[in-house]
């Protein structure tokens, strides 16, 4: 997983989840709200967001949210907005990335 720290309140990560044997990777944005909680949002998937007390908790909850959202798209027969990794990577070239384990 790649993470970019942009200031004190925003982080972006590429999160991957497996659904039905396929791996799906999406960009997730993490922001601190006014109460200090971390809100996670996947801009590519409408309604796919969650929150946690810490970045690690929000990250784990977001994996669950991604999996449930993707499963819902597939069950309903809706087309998933697939974003190519290389295209996303190009958008992040202005930021420094570190590889982290979750």
Image (spheres, rainbow, N blue to C red):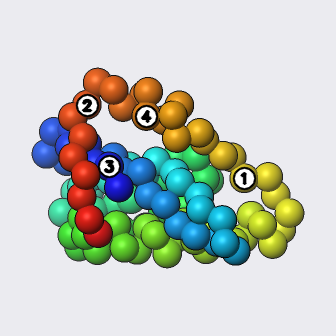
Mark number, residue 2: 3
How many angstroms separate mark 3 from mark 1 (CA)?
22 Å
- Crowding at dot 1, Cα within 10 Å, few <14 / some 14-19 / many 20+, comes out as some
Whether residue 56 is situated above or below residue 39 in the rendered picture:
below
At 59% across and 58% down in the image, what residue appears? 24
Q: How far across and how far down the image is residue 31, in percent?
A: 29, 52
Q: Which residue is mark 2?
A: 95
How many angstroms separate mark 3 from mark 4 (CA)?
10 Å
Give the mark nearer the N terminus: 3 vs 2: 3
Q: Nearer the viewer, mark 1 or mark 4?
A: 4
Q: Quadrant of residue 52?
A: bottom left
Quadrant of the drawing holding the N terminus: bottom left
- Crowding at dot 3, Cα within 10 Å, few <14 / some 14-19 / many 20+, comes out as some
Give the mark nearer the N terminus: 1 vs 4: 1
Give the mark nearer the N terminus: 2 vs 4: 4
Q: Quadrant of residue 100?
A: bottom left
Q: Is residue 76 left or right of residue 7?
A: right
Q: Is residue 95 left or right of residue 1?
A: left
Give the mark nearer the N terminus: 2 vs 1: 1
How many angstroms separate mark 2 from mark 1 (CA)?
27 Å
Q: Secondary structure at mark 1?
A: loop
Quadrant of the drawing holding the C terminus: bottom left
- Crowding at dot 2, Cα within 10 Å, few <14 / some 14-19 / many 20+, comes out as few
Residue 54 appearing in the image: yes
Q: How far across and how far down the image is residue 30, in percent?
A: 32, 53
Q: Nearer the viewer, residue 83 or 51?
A: 83
Give the mark nearer the N terminus: 3 vs 1: 3
Q: Which residue is mark 4?
A: 89
Q: Which residue is mark 1?
A: 80
Q: How far across and how far down the image is residue 58, in percent?
A: 33, 69
Label count reads 4
């Amino acid at each position: 997983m790649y993470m970019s720290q942009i200031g004190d309140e925003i982080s972006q990560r590429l999160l991957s989840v497996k659904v039905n044997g396929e791996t799906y990777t999406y960009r997730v944005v993490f922001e601190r709200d006014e109460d200090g909680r971390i809100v996670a949002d996947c801009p590519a998937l409408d309604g796919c967001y969650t929150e946690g007390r810490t970045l690690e908790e929000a990250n784990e909850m977001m994996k669950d949210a991604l999996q449930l959202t993707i499963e819902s798209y597939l069950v309903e027969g809706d087309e998933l907005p697939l974003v190519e990794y290389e295209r996303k990577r190009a958008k992040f070239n202005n930021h420094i990335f570190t590889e982290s384990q979750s």
